[in-house]
Amino acid sequence: MTLVTKSNSRMRNRIFIAVLLFALIVPLKPAYAQDVAGPVYIVQPGDSLSSIASRFNVSLNDLMAANGIVDPNQLAAGQQLIIPGLEGVTGILNTRYINFGDSYRSMVRQTQVPEDLFKKLNHVVSPSEFYVGVSMIIPEQQQSQYNKRISPAVGESLLEVAVRNNTDPWALVEINNLHGSWDGLPSDTLFAPGEASAAGASGLPSAFISAEIRDLPIKQGGTGVIKIATQPDVQLGGVLVDRPLHFFPNEDGTQVALQGVHALLEPGVYPLRLDATLPDGSIQSYEQLILINSGFYQDITISVPSETLDQSITEPEIQQILSLVSPVTDTKNWNTIFNLPVAEQFCITDWFGIRRTYLGQGSDLTLNGFHSGVDYGICSEANPYDIYSPAPGNVVFSNFLTVRGNATIIDHGWGVYSGFWHQEESYVTAGQHIETGELIGKIGGTGRVTGPHLHWELWVNGVQVDPLDWLIQTYP
């Protein structure tokens, strides 16, 4: 009896050891990863788990379960998420922004994503929803090599188009989902294998070769960069929201316009129009709606001296500033990102775009507005009071203003201006040329302030924009 018991004990020990060794050699997959299949979405900056779930029409719980997520707040840009419930879709789901000249039909043709799948992934209700700056989801494994855009001219057959572009009409019919060789309409955007051609490559009128809006979607208080390639001797103009665009020749042979978007502009869709004046004086125009996103600015209330809220003083001062920053000079004085206007030992005491309600001290006067620049304060004795020019330019104003105190304005060219308010002293005079990093003033507490600081303001074609954007990337 004892021998049998010992034998059974040894057998159980052997089984236990074998199971343990198997577990160490072949680790079990986490429960959440079993039987889960689906395409992978790469998290974009600004995404949340709930917004991703909503975008792909899946429940938050299913999305969390498919990815083994316990805390929905633990999400980082670049993270890969399995999207459950998308039968028949595999691979990586890429994000692509609609640019100027793109349309629903051209996106489907170029990406070669089946139309029903394209609609499913992007919840397309109407092709009219295709605004510049709206993001689209494109499966990576179905990315197309058809990057050559072509457009039939008036009276040109599909055969002639095919010969001109070194392909055959039946390939164009298949690639572009046409009903037949007779189905190519004049000025329609078609795609073919190869690189973009020089003429008619954008689906825009013939004067345009290409058009690109950078850093989509544009936010409230952001800077729009519009880069256009045209046929020779074409002059450009246009409108973004309600501001006329000014184009300048770029180093790469394109023409570029910089335009600020007002921080108080309501998020939504607004017009973007390009006008091309040909050498014979004729004009070709193209208009498309562009999405303007929220800047997510906070609201605060502050108390200031009542005399600085008197509109008989504030309004003429605003008009004076506008008259100074409105001229658009042809010379671009900068070539790199802008520098800090203060020493490296700095602190920011107030950010661009914050909505402000000003209360007049000793009165019932109030004034609503927004913070139109970045405030650099004196946060310790180690902070120097020096102010430096962030980029080269010409001084167009250096004097005292009631609200802005001792003020300096520098014209950097192409409609870009820097304003420096509330200085204790200004060391420059109007007409003086300034280089990057040159000492121009001293931080102070003059004008409408609650304490000493530098208010740095940046204007782009008559609109204040977030200066911090210009410290991290080069424009244009």
Image (spheres, rainbow, N blue to C red):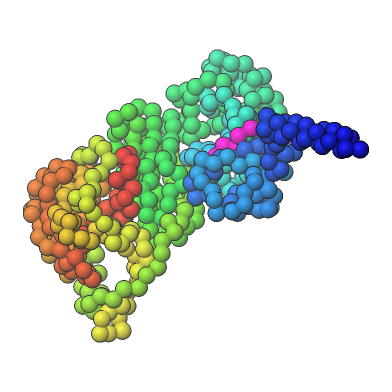
**At x 65% / y 37%, what residue is drawn?**
39
The one of 213 and 337 positioned closer to us in this rendering: 337
The one of 304 and 189 positioned closer to us in this rendering: 304
Determine if the magenta segment contains residue 169: no
Q: Is 374 above or below relative to 226?
A: below
Number of residue marks: 0
Q: Position of residue 378 (x, y in %)?
A: 20, 61
Q: Is 237 above or below relative to 208?
A: below
Of the 4 image quadrants, the one containing the C terminus is top left
Q: Position of residue 79 (x, y in %)?
A: 54, 41
Q: Position of residue 252 (x, y in %)?
A: 32, 28
Instruction: Give the extent of the magenta segment.
Output: 88-95
Residue 375 at least partly seen: yes
**At x 73% / y 33%, what residue is drawn?**
17
**At x 39% / y 35%, what residue is drawn?**
228
Horizontal side of residue 100 vs 302, given as left or right: right
